[in-house]
Amino acid sequence: MSGAFFDENWKRTVYCGRVNQDDEDKTIVINGWVRKRRDLGGIIFLEIWDHTGLVQVVINPETDVSLHERAKQLRSEYVVAIKGTVKRRPAGTENPSLATGNFEVIAKDLLVLSPSALPPFDPNEADAVDENIRLKYRYLDLRRKVMQGNLRLRSKAAQYTRVFFDGEGFVEVETPMLTKSTPEGARDYLVPSRVNPGKFYALPQSPQIFKQILMISGLDKYFQIVKCF
């Protein structure tokens, strides 16, 4: 769709959801997914998004016929890089529900980084999609705002937990994920050893033994955010 190749000139200079008045009348480069493409009276409007949000891109055939023809071929979930100038939206066309709703990018050039086949479902309308389908195409499901919010909330919770315990003098120690099976305990999840045929590791049900070793080693204030099996 474009004779250009990705190089330093196509690297993102601004995230989609962070286009603001500081970028007005400046030429920027955004990288992201095509969320929607609308053709109104010959002018093509693209919604381009990344993890920060989305911004509207405008492509006018009177400005660049070749660019307009290439934009016609774009579909949802294409990954693109777009160069353009940031302008304020005409009065009455602002979108107050968007952080970037007062601005749009007037495209000068675009590069398709990765075309996309028709996705099995629209990530923006996935609530009604069967959970098994969403799990099969997890990478699409994780593009939803609510799913990204969950991951970021989990990350923040882990960050705040670490900051708190560090301030209290605790030491974070990651205990082993492969350990010895304990026959007297509950049934273990076993992992075969490649270098020792017939031997198995067990996934730990609890870091209790390792915690006790740390205690008698002198680390009386220890913590970790641990996975148990």
Image (cartoon, rainbow, N blue to C red):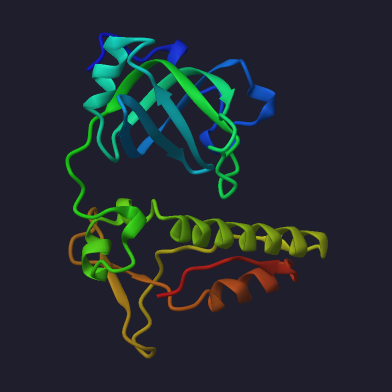
- Residue shown at 34%/27% (left/top)? 44
Q: Position of residue 109 (x, y in %)?
A: 38, 14
- Work out whether residue 31 or residue 64 is closer to the camera in this orientation and state it: 64
From the viewer's perspective, is residue 22 above or below residue 186? above
Q: Is residue 208 above or below residue 50?
A: below
Q: Indicate left or right for 27 with 130 as reference.
A: right
Residue at 17 percent of width and 39 percent of height: 117
Q: Is residue 86 above or below residue 132?
A: above
Residue 153 in the image: state x and y as whole percent: 58, 61
Residue 83 coordinates in the image, percent (x, y):
45, 17
Up/down of 126 relative to 75, above or below: below
Residue for point 54% across, 77% down: 209
Of 142 and 54, the residue lying toward us: 54
**Is residue 133 toward the left or the right of residue 160 in the image?**
left
* Residue drawn 65% across the image and 69% down it: 214
- Front one among 26 and 136: 26
In the displayed structure, does residue 115 sit left or right of residue 56?
left
Inspect this view and state whether residue 174 appears. no
Q: Quadrant of the N terminus?
A: top left
Residue 189's image quarter? bottom left
Query: Quarter of the image containing the C terminus?
Result: bottom left
